[in-house]
Amino acid sequence: MIRKKRSTQKIAIPSDDGILVGQQFKSSRAFVVATVDDGKILRQELRWNLISEIMTSPHGYYYNLADCNTIIVNEIGEGHTRLLGSINKEVIQTEETLVNNAFLIYLRKASLKAEKIKSL
């Protein structure tokens, strides 16, 4: 029996309350992080941006994102986009305002993209 390789990833969305997508990336109070496997959300957690962690972590502002592959944002500056790209983070912009909807839209697009690649 051939086992399919699992594709676990973590996706982060800035938020002030865990419900709405934060309007500004850098000033968001927290990130909602979803653990996704094979296109399905296994778990969601809220990670607060704590100044003590920002100041002591080698990752600085991005300490909450160290294990994340993708960050979905409403607004982000070009400098932050380049910096996140330099540490291998995919940045996706969305106009969606609800965190759960933003996750679902991203996963649906990723699934369609994977199906298209398989058919080539």
Image: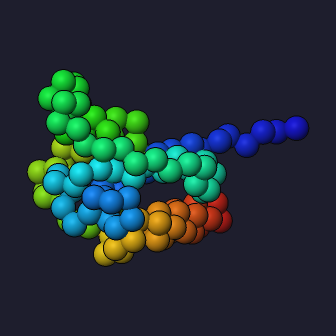
Q: Please name whichever residue, 35 or 50, is drawn nearer the observer in this view of the structure.
A: 50
Count of numbered circles on the image: 0
In the displayed image of the protein, which residue is found farthest to the front?
Answer: 17
| Rendered residue at 78%/39% (across/down) | 3
The residue lying toward the viewer, choosing from 79 and 31, is 31
Looking at the image, which residue is at 16% across and 54% down?
27
Classify residue 5 by image quadrant. Answer: top right
Residue at 18% x, 61% y: name it: 24
Residue projecting furthest to the right: 1
At 13% from the left edge and 58% from the top edge, which residue is drawn? 77
* Quadrant in which the N terminus is drawn: top right
Tell me if 98 is positioned left or right of 41 in this view: left
Q: How is the image coloured?
A: rainbow
* Quadrant that contains the C terminus: bottom right
Left or right of 9 on screen, residue 86: left
Q: Position of residue 29 (x, y in %)?
A: 24, 51
Q: Nearer the viewer, residue 17 or 86?
A: 17
- Residue 98 in percent (x, y) is at 39, 71
Q: Is residue 93 visible?
A: no
**Percent of width and height locating residue 109:** 50, 68
Residue 96, visible in the rendered structure: yes
**Image coords of residue 115 (percent x, y):** 62, 65
